[in-house]
Amino acid sequence: MTSTSPLKGAPTGVRPAVRAVPAYPFSPIQVPIKLDQNENPYDFPAELKAQALQKMLEQPWNRYPDLHADTLAAHIAEYEGWDVDGVVVTPGSNVLIKLLTELAGIEQTVLTVDPTFSVYTLEARMLGARLVQVPLNEDFSLPVDRLKIELERQRPGVLYITQPHAPTGHVDSVARVRELLDAAGEWVVVLDEAYYQYGGIDGRELVRQYPNALSLRTFSKAWGLAGLRAGYALAGADLATQLQKLVPAFNMSVLTQAALEVALKNPGYVQERVAEAVAERGRVQAALADHPTCQALPSQSNFFLLRTPDAEAMYRHLIDHGIVVRRQDHLTGLEGCLRVGIGTPAENDVLIGAVQALK
């Protein structure tokens, strides 16, 4: 028999575009206070979790779930006041970003700002789309005029507009977003609204007015259900039909759907927790306003940027105090910045004390 040596590295059949892209940039660090992933600091309410578990037990586990999470989509449509034919559900909005790149980016263009949510750029590069990024304005607002130039110059594809923006927390006016929608022509325009509850904004009316636009939403942030992995798109029926073609069949388990149905019938806890997060965001930023060397930048999300003289030193200092945040100082225009999530009041007290202790 002929023996062969084990292959080293990735098989040669792997596309060069995949080889060239690094893995998603996240390494978990175990500390008591976790403010690095913009999560809701509170778990799903215990009484609702009990209802969800009971509902899970009532489901047949030996049968496939709905082909396209149809029952869950109907509950989402009722909650959002949306046509069910325009709801597309997947295990997390990250999956939808990948599918949208497949839908309108491959052999075409992915247009976004810089800095931006890293999944937009990772998927564009891996799937061979032409990636075009336009730097944000100095105040983190959308560079509308420069984006309009690229909309005209580039081959149509997908344009990502994040409201509130990640990682800055900035929100642009409806008028500025509408300018881009008016200029988009044949482009697919994605309003990524993962954090919309914290900014007091809602892009549904814009999506209703523009058949080439859609809204991305998630259960991971305000709903406090990141562990379940679920997100959805709201779109016109025609665009949703094309996007649904790319969604794998039976992609949402009956267990996840059962829990989400309970959440959608009991949304009151979401408003309460969003209100607390917004109040805590203001309290933390006010407490740090007079810091001699650091600046808590304005935000309309459940996180904010902390600009420091030395991001590495502050990051390590916070780790020493049992707090993990996310470094952003490698990104365009974010020199010295850390991204800090809003935690519980007690966690925020520790954060304030730790930042104030480092002058």
Image (cartoon, rainbow, N blue to C red):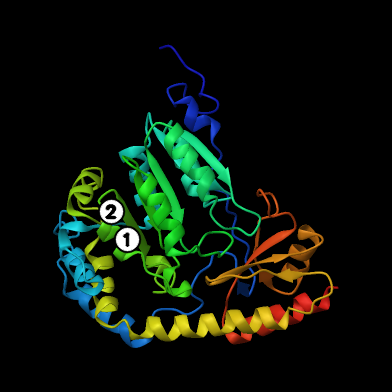
Quadrant placement of the C terminus: bottom right
In this rendering, would 98 be left or right of 337? left
Say the numbered circle drawn on residue 210: 2
Quadrant placement of the N terminus: top left
Residue ID at (31%, 83%): 48
Q: Is residue 151 visible?
A: yes
Q: Name the residue nearer the viewer: 149 or 85.
A: 149
Of helix, strand and loop, which one carries label 2? loop
Is the Cβ of the residue at disc 1 closer than 8 Å to that at disc 2? yes
Residue ID at (54%, 36%): 21
How many marks on residues?
2
Where does label 1 land, which residue? 206
Q: Is residue 234 visible?
A: no
Q: Position of residue 288 (x, y in %)?
A: 73, 78
Vertical order, 81 against 246 (above or below):
below
Vertical order, 261 against 307 (above or below):
below
